[in-house]
Amino acid sequence: MPYPNAGAAVAIDHQVAAPPPPSAANPPKAPRDYRLDFFRGLALVFIYVDHIPNNALSYLTLRSFAISDAAEVFIFISGYTAALVYGRAMLREGGLMASARIGRRVWQLYIAHLFIFLIYNGEVSYTMQHFNNPLFADELQVGAFLDQPGDTLIHVLLLEFQPSLLNILPLYILLLVMFPVMLLALRRSIWLALVPSLLVYGAVQLWGINLPGYPDDATWYFDPFAYQLLFVVAAIFGYAQVTGRPPLPLHSTSTGWRVITGLAVIVALAAFLVQAAATLHSLIPSFPNLVNVPLWADDKTTLPLPRIANMLALAWLVARLVPREARFLTSWGGWLLIICGQSSLYIFCLTILLSVVANIAYTIVGSTLIIQIVVNMIGLVCMLALGLLLAWFNAGGRMPRRPRPASHGEPA
C-alpha cells in the first residue's frame, strides 16, 4: 500500500503548467488531486460563515463538530502546498531560486493584506459616518487606527496591528518568511525540521512566548511560534509527495499505516462527540455537555495539542478514506467549490470584506434568521461568481468545464 497523501484535504492556488521532462532533480508531477481544491473551497466558505458574528449558519461549520476550525485548515493548506511547490522548485532550480520565489509570494501576500486593510477601514469609517454607530469601530478593533492613524500606520506596516478578521494573513506571511530555512532542513532530514519545531512549540505551551502586537500590551492572535508546528508537519507530507519518499519511517506493507488510521479515527470521533455535545448544549441548555473542555485546550492563540491533533487526524482520514475519483468532486456543487478553491487568495480576500458588510447589515437591519440566511446566501453567491469569473479569465475567455487532472502550480 503506498503511503497516503496526508495533505490531500487541503492546498492553495495552483496554475496549470506544462510539466518539464522528469529527472533526478526534477521528479515527475503527479496528476492534480481535486480533493485539494474541493476542501480548500469548503474551508473558504467556513471562513466566511464563521466570521459573521452571531451567525446561525456557523453551527453547520467545522468548528461546531471538531476541536479545530478553518484557521487550522488554512495553515495546513499553506504548509503542505508551500512544500509541494517550492520543494519542487528547490530540486529543479536550487535553494536560492526557490527562496526568491518564496520572497515574491511573501511580497504579494503583504500587498494583499495592506489592500484588504485599506478597504476594511473604509467600510468601517463609512458605517460610522453615515449610521452614527461609534461602537462598530470597537467591535472590529480598528478604533486605534481611526483615533491615531499616523502612529498606528507604522504598526500596520509591521504587521503588529491586526484588527478582527485581519490576523491570519500576517501569520501566513511570517511562516513563509521562515520557510526557506525549513525547506533546506527538510532537504537534509525530516528530523532536522521537525525537532526544532517541536521544541519551539513546547516553549509556547510552557511559557506562552508570542510576538508583540498593537495597541497596548496586545500580542498576535495566532501565535506564530505555535502554528509553525502545524505548518512544518504539513510541509513534511508535501515534501514527501515531491520526492516520492514516505513521510514516516514505515514500509508500505506495514500495519503501522492501519494503526495510525485507527488512532486518527479515535481522535476525530472523540473531538466530534465533545464538540457536538457542546454545540447542542449551547442551543438547548437541557442537553448534557459531555466534557467541560478547559480553556487552555481550546485556545486558538497557542494551538494546544488537542486542536493540532484533531486537525492532523482529519487531514489523515480525508487522505485515506476519500478517493481521488469521489463522485461528489464532479457534482455541480463540488465543481463550484473546486473553482473557488483554485483562486483561494482572491476568494479569501473577498470573504473578509463580505464579512464586514454582513456585520454592518446585522447592525443596521437586525439579525433575524431570515436576514441571516439572505446575508449568507448573498455572500456565497458573490464568492462563487468571483470564482467563476477568475476561472473564465484564466481559461482565456471560455467558461470552465468540469475538473480534469492537471499539474500543481504556484500557491496563493
Image: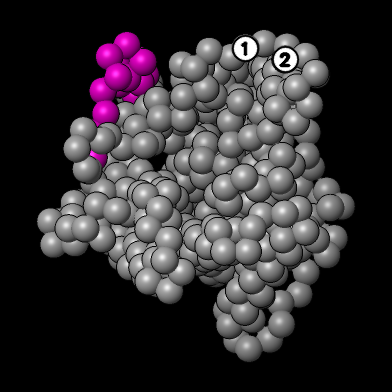
Q: Is residue 382 left or right of residue 121?
A: right
Q: Tell me which amino acid carries mark 2.
A: Asn
54, 298: nearer the viewer: 54
Residue at the image position 60 percent from the left and 18 percent from the top = 250
Badge 2 density bin: few <14, some 14–19, many ≥20, Cα 10 Å: some
Q: Is residue 121 left or right of residue 394?
A: left
Image location of residue 177, percent across then percent down: 27, 46
Residue at the image position 29 percent from the left and 53 percent from the top = 143
103, 247: nearer the viewer: 103
141, 220: nearer the viewer: 141
Span shown in magenta: 195-213
Judging by the rendered image, the residue that carries numbered circle 1 is: 292
Q: Secondary structure at mark 1?
A: loop
Q: Is residue 207 magenta?
A: yes
Would you identify the image quadrant in which residue 370 lies? Answer: bottom right
Q: Tell me which amino acid carries mark 1.
A: Asn
Question: Main structural element of the magenta stretch: helix, strand or loop?
Answer: helix
Q: Is residue 109 left or right of residue 41?
A: left
Image location of residue 210, percent across then percent down: 26, 29
Q: Which mark is residue 411?
A: none
* Residue that lies at the very extreme toward the bottom in this rendered image: 397
Answer whether residue 229 is visible to the viewer in this image.
no
Mark 1 near mark 2, Cβ–Cβ under 8 Å? yes
Q: Which mark is residue 289?
A: 2
